[in-house]
Image (cartoon, rainbow, N blue to C red):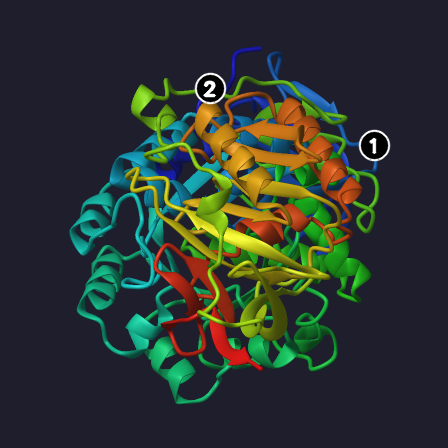
Amino acid sequence: MTRPSLKSWADAAPRLIAVAAGRDSADMVIRQGIWVNVQSRELLPDHDIAIADGRIAYVGPDAGHCIGDRTQVIEAEGRYMLPGLCDGHMHIESGMLTPAEFARAVIPHGTTTMFTDPHEIANVLGLEGVRLMHDEALLQPVNIYTQMPSCAPSAPGLETTGFEITAEDVAEAMDWPGIIGLGEMMNFPGVVAGDPQMLAEMAATQAAGKTVGGHYASPDLGPAFHAYAAGGPADDHEGTKESDAVARVRQGMRAMLRLGSAWYDVESQITAVTEKGLDPRNFILCTDDCHSGTLVNDGHMNRVVRHAIECGCDPLVALQMATVNTAAHFGLERELGSIAPGRRADVILSPDLRALPIETVIARGQVVAEDGRILVDCPHIDWPEAARASVRLGKPLGAEDFEIAAPEGANHVRARVIGVIENQAPTKALSADLPVSEGLVEATGEICQIALVERHRGTGGVTNAFVQGFGYEGPMAMASTVAHDSHHMIVVGTDRAQMALAANRLAEVGGGVVLYADGEEKALVELPIAGLMSDDLAQSVAAKAEALGEAMRDAGCTLNNAYMQHSLLALVVIPELRISDKGLVDVTRFEVVPVIEEVLT
């Protein structure tokens, strides 16, 4: 069957009206299912859906008058007919996949709309990187909208990125066909301080009639939070507790509750709806960051909806948070997010509204997946060589590059330590008493060394510090060119020589993640596109990521999705302590602080 074209609502309206009236036949009719109506929050059994030109023409108890000789008829057989799922905030690069392969991975899970912020690639390749992501996204058989990144660097003066995004870049991108708004405004101190560039970016977005994404990562809900809300961000996904969600919706923001591979913030916030009784239409479910293993093995937005239901949310409310709420937030309620006339024909068939097994996925009026198998092509662009040559160390690194010198004459020191918190993005600012051997500060016990290696300009620069929480044992090192958001290279290890081995290996393969233990390479995930993504199939990348996870566990790490924790340790806009090419950053004060606090006698 030839795939029906997706016309604009205005262009399709004459035929939609004719089909609904019975004067023309539909391209597809889904018969006798339970209509999950997220507009009225009802379950309506024994209903039909008629589709024409990729849009819904009719929903009612009998679409027999819409069926002609060429109409494809799908028997729902009493299954639930629910809208395609929407992810309100996510980063494709976190899946280690290109937009095409990400789409291929999530379509069988029922995701038909994504609102993506490619600020990872923006930090590496600038506006051209955003354009490449945008262009490939527009080729896909589902809806992938792009938010123009707002903060590259995320915290000016505290990190150096490969490229910077300017207010002029933002204004230019607002005219691109797939740009839906401004990506998360991570530089919340800049907004609070009235930074002219941040205000200019938000002004250009609002002048274009588009949505400003938020990112307020501070626990301070006093005047600073109110100043941030006054600046214009329309949503926020950085909440971790009920009071965070309540504060945001009271200020007219949408609270985005995320369940990613490592961020578990739904359960702690959804009580604002399930117990406190706040209006659920101001809550949105999202993933933020999901790696390929999660996508292939556990799911995508279907996983988030199931989790919300398990946390006590009414299934219809949870579905609203992943469909119509999201569409309305981005000004697309008349275009998608519900099963209603005129909307894009994005429909899921499932036999169970709580467990949510995805049996059939229809996008834009075409069956795109069945029983976990994708049935359509996901086209790729031709990624240029410049996007595949982004790792520049300047020189081979040795163990000496990872040394932390002690003050002269010191036998022990008190050092600042980054403390990893399982399943959350924030870290703790810890202190530890560490020994000195031959003039070098040594990590002991549960503490490892962490280094940030400059990889954009080949300066040879290495920043060294300490981290606790991974639980590594024995001589090992793990390196990654995914290092949110500056995307230099993060290396964590217990052995300086192996830290050098790992860093040099990633330079050799053009980026990725690698783990060494006992002097041997135990796992490698190659990410040659910007050092962030592979253009291999999701299943292949997921298998390598699973091998990496196994190697981390063999090295003593028991954290859930510890790789995601590793990759976020350079994000200098989330408290409390991070590492950058400028040094160790205290994110509660937004200043670089020394690793050594004091010499101990």
State the residue position of label 1.
77
Q: Amino acid at mark 1?
A: Glu
Q: What crowding class fits label 1: few (fewer than 14 Cα within 10 Å), some (14-19), or many (20 or more)?
A: some
Q: Quadrant of the N terminus?
A: top right
Vertical arrangement, residue 440 with respect to residue 232, above or below: above
What is the spatial separation of the Cα atoms under label 2 and label 1, in whole angstroms? 33 Å
Vertical arrangement, residue 564 with respect to residue 98, above or below: below
Instruction: Give how far across and how far down residue 444 sits, in percent.
Output: 68, 61
320 left or right of 74 in image:
left
Q: Quadrant of residue 101?
A: top right
403 left or right of 591 in image:
right
Vertical arrangement, residue 299 with respect to residue 270, above or below: above
Residue at image coords 39%, 62%: 583
Q: Mark 2 or mark 1, which has the lower sequence index?
A: 1
Q: Quadrant of residue 290?
A: top right
Q: What crowding class fits label 2: few (fewer than 14 Cα within 10 Å), some (14-19), or many (20 or more)?
A: some
Q: Amino acid at mark 2?
A: Pro
State the residue position of label 2.
379
Q: Secondary structure at mark 2?
A: loop
Instruction: Give how far across and how far down residue 377 sits, in percent.
Output: 54, 17
Instruction: Give how far across and how far down residue 241 sits, in percent.
Output: 64, 75
